[in-house]
Amino acid sequence: MKTHFDANILDYCEILHDLNREIVILSGLRIYDTADMDFGFRKKEKLFITICQQLSLLIPCRSIDKEFQLEFNDGILSFSNICPFLEDSYTELFVEHKNFLQRIKCVRNKTLHSPHKLDIIGGSFENKGPAIVCKLDGNLMELYSSEFIPIIIKLNEIFDRLIEELKNYCSDLDINEDGYPFISLSIEKVFLLEYCRFNSILQSELLPNISKLMRDF
């Protein structure tokens, strides 16, 4: 069980933390509303691209022989040998949201080296949250913030359990002279994270108002 699990997991925890913040901001934006013009149209495109890229980092998947599937030996899933629950949890998440994840992966792949290929050409605010209508490499695509939210909620639940596994892992490490395991301050910070607290925000009717509060003045 001697791996770099304790240190490497920090990168994914930080990505998920940032993703929660950014989806909250996205959830309150009205793409063409003059009240949101202060946020900047280009900022909205960059925020959307960033969210798609972060989701792709947290959910490793790709098309193999024209079949879109999870990559169980890549990214966070490479820790499945230490945390076996990851494979089942991610499989459940992937099966439920496969079509949407495939569209997100397409955005990520197209914009990774050529962000100019994405143009947000329309949008509205509906019961499902902001609708983002974009043209990606000539093809029209429509996405809703509400399609992102169930995925992020599930990721928050998975990572809370993962942190519990990390706590157990660190408790097995060598003990220092004060009787505590040799763990970094960064890992101690992760121990204090409770991602499911963010779920109460993502599921709240106040989400659009919280979104406005989190933006710069």
Image: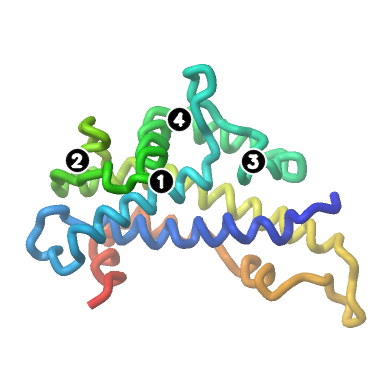
Side (left or right) of 174 relative to 200: right
Between the residue at mark 1 and the residue at mark 3, the CA separation in whole angstroms equals 22 Å
Q: Position of residue 77 (x, y in %)?
A: 64, 41
Regarding mark 1 in the picture, which secondary structure is present there?
loop
Question: Which structural element holds mark 4?
Answer: helix
Mark 4–mark 1 distance (CA, rounded to whole Å): 25 Å
Q: Tell me the mark number nearer the camera, choosing from 2 and 4.
A: 2
Q: Are marks 2 and 3 in contact (CB under 8 Å)?
A: no
Q: Which residue is mark 2?
A: 133
Q: Is residue 29 above or below residue 114?
A: below
Place residue 106 in its image quadrant: top left
> Measuring 68% from the left and 41% from the top, which residue is drawn there?
78
Mark 4 vs mark 3: which is more N-terminal?
3
Q: Earlier in the sequence, mark 4 or mark 1?
A: 4
Q: Residue furthest right?
A: 177
Residue under the image location 64 percent in, 34 percent down = 72
Of circles 4 and 3, the one toward us is 3
Task: Identify the secondary structure beneath mark 3.
Answer: helix
Q: Earlier in the sequence, mark 2 or mark 4?
A: 4
C-alpha separation, residue under disc 2 versus residue under disc 3: 32 Å
Name the residue that disc number 3 marks: 77
**Residue depicted at x 67% and y 36%:** 73
Q: CA distance from mark 2 to mark 4?
A: 23 Å
Q: Amino acid at mark 1?
A: Leu
Give the number of the disc on residue 112.
1
Query: Where in the figure is residue 146, as x and y percent of width and height?
Result: 30, 44
Residue on which the image places disc 4: 96
Vertical placement of residue 45 versus 216, above or below: above
Residue 184's label in the rendered image is none
Q: Residues within 10 Å of mark 4 (few under 14, many from 20)?
A: few
Separation of residues labelled 4 and 3 (CA atoms): 18 Å
